[in-house]
Amino acid sequence: MNYRWLLFDLDNTLYDFDAASHFALHQTLEEYGVDPSSGNKEIYYDINHSCWTAFENGAMDFKTLRNKRFELFVNEIGVNADASGMGNRYLKLLSETDFKIEGAMPLLDHLEPNYNLVVVTNGLKEVKRPQLSKPEISKYFKAIIISEEIGIAKPHEGFFDHTFNTIGSPDKSDVIIIGDNLNSDIRGGQDYGIDTCWFNPNQKNNATDVKPTFEIDTLDQLLKIV
């Protein structure tokens, strides 16, 4: 293929968000005197997933998402804790993490001289900007698009309109999006008319109606596609 622009999702595509979240959540719970057992963490992860799904579907805004998940969490586990403070501390710790997916940096090193690389992430700017401002990662990207900063998220058309306007409106045939999320990344790209590459390291079964153009389970397999 002759792609010129590669749009990369960030969390669980280039950055290991699961590892980062586990670290930040564990430390936050301990600091606030909440049992950091796996059971409590799973409750938070389920609530967080529901909140992000609502956000991607337009049923929740950024401000609500930022605060609501820890409010729901402390209510669910029945503890008297400062939900707002926990949320702030969790995001601060998360912004300081630097867990990358295996092979991410060698891949970027290989691609950057020959392609235009762009980050397209659904995330909170107070987390994503510190992570992406480090010279060792920011040097690879022509543009960084963060959903909170533009007020709209993947998979919505407006997110992709903004991205294309930012990078000079290339022909859609020159663009591919790479990401782990079948809804926000793959459905979003598919609906916008660009090729998609589903990063599926755990080889999950795709039981949806979303059919990616390509599927990979290690990042280095992308080199055979682009």
Image: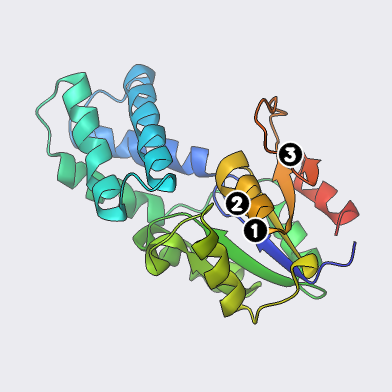
Query: Is residue 100 visible in the rendered structure shown here?
Result: no
Q: Establish if 75 lies above or below 53.
A: above
SS category of the residue bearing label 2: helix
Q: Residue at x 48, y 71 (%)?
A: 133
Label 1 sits on residue: 192
Q: Residue at x 34, y 37 (%)?
A: 25
Numbered badge on residue 188: 2
Could you tell me residue 59's position as x and y percent?
34, 44
What type is the residue that disc 2 sits on?
A: Gly
Marks 2 & 3, CB-CB < 8 Å contact: no
What type is the residue that disc 1 sits on?
A: Tyr
Q: Residue furthest top?
A: 39
Could you tell me residue 11's position as x and y percent?
54, 49
Numbered badge on residue 148: none
Which of these two is toward me, 105 or 124? 124
SS category of the residue bearing label 3: loop
Horizontally, is 64 left or right of 108 in the view? left
Could you tell me residue 30's position as x and y percent?
25, 32
Q: Establish if 188 lies above or below 48.
A: below
Q: Residue at x 27, y 38 (%)?
A: 69
Q: Establish if 166 lies above or below 54.
A: below
Label 3 sits on residue: 211
Residue 78, image quadrant: top left
Marks 1 & 2, CB-CB < 8 Å contact: yes
What type is the residue that disc 3 sits on?
A: Lys
